[in-house]
């Protein structure tokens, strides 16, 4: 008796490889480049937002500042042994300026606590507010020649200096040497509030 041969399974058809066109790889490269650029822009915007919020935290919340109109800051080295110098100008809202002009020094003596002060550490925390003009002290050296205090004598106290715009420097000089404004030293820097000019100055050295 002759055995009946078993039917053999048909071999699976091979899938033909499809080659990618140069246009496909170009599109992929462009997509990757665009994605990287978008991530870079987003990271830069996020950092700028963080930096802006960080700088606003130097001002007591009750002053209601929301922006920075001028800033010039430099640092030389990092950590112990490093040096820094800077000035920032914050616009003061009109209604706050009017409140300060009406209440005077009492406005600052009754400042409410800042939000999240523990997270802000010393930033925005000032005490012993005084009316201008600012007087020479251990913080702010007297000028070498008779005359009003000079912004550069404070900002450049440790021999490291910045080149402040002439109009900003003139304005700051007038504020610190005239009555009608208020100032206080913090752990780092001095804050000067001018209701008449609707400006908040923050000067520091180190």
Image: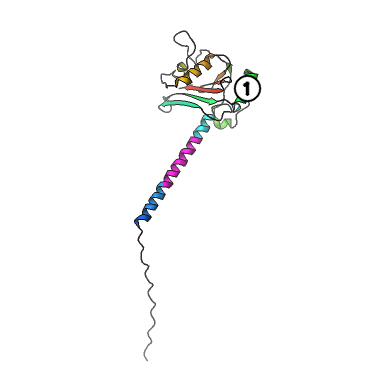
Q: How far across and how far down the image is residue 108, in percent?
A: 61, 21
The N terminus appears in which quarter of the rendering? bottom left
Q: Which residues are magenta?
A: 34-49
Relative image position of residue 7 (x, y in whole percent)? 39, 81
Q: Residue at x 45, y 16 (%)?
A: 153
| Vertical order, 62 against 11 (above or below) | above
Quadrant showing the C terminus: top left
162 or 24, nearer to the observer = 24
Q: Nearer the viewer, residue 50 or 68?
A: 68
Query: What residue is pinned by disc 1?
Result: 98
Q: Residue furthest bottom?
A: 1
Residue 103 image point, x, y percent: 65, 19
33 vs 138, left or right, is left
Label 1 Cα neighbours within 10 Å, binned few <14 / some 14-19 / many ≥20 = some
Q: Is residue 56 left or right of residue 16?
A: right
Work out whether residue 102 can be spotted. Answer: yes
């Amino acid at each position: 008796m002759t055995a009946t041969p078993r039917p053999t399974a048909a071999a699976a058809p091979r899938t033909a490889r499809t080659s990618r066109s140069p246009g496909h790889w170009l599109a992929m490269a462009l997509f990757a480049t665009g994605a990287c650029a978008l991530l870079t822009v987003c990271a830069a915007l996020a950092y700028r937002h963080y930096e802006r919020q960080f700088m606003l935290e130097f001002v007591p919340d009750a002053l209601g500042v929301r922006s920075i109109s001028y800033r010039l800051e430099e640092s030389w080295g990092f950590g112990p042994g490093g040096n820094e110098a800077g000035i920032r100008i914050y616009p003061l809202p009109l209604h706050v300026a009017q409140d300060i002009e009406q209440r005077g020094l009492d406005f600052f003596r009754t400042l409410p606590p800042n939000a999240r002060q523990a997270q802000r550490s010393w930033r925005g925390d000032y005490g012993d507010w005084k009316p201008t003009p600012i007087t020479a002290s251990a913080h702010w050296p007297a000028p070498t020649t008779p005359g009003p205090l000079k912004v550069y004598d404070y900002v450049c106290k440790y021999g490291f200096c910045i080149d402040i715009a002439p109009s900003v420097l003139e304005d700051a000089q007038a504020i610190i040497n005239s009555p009608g404004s208020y100032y206080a030293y913090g752990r780092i820097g001095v804050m000067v509030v001018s209701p008449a000019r609707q400006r908040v100055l923050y000067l520091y050295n180190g």
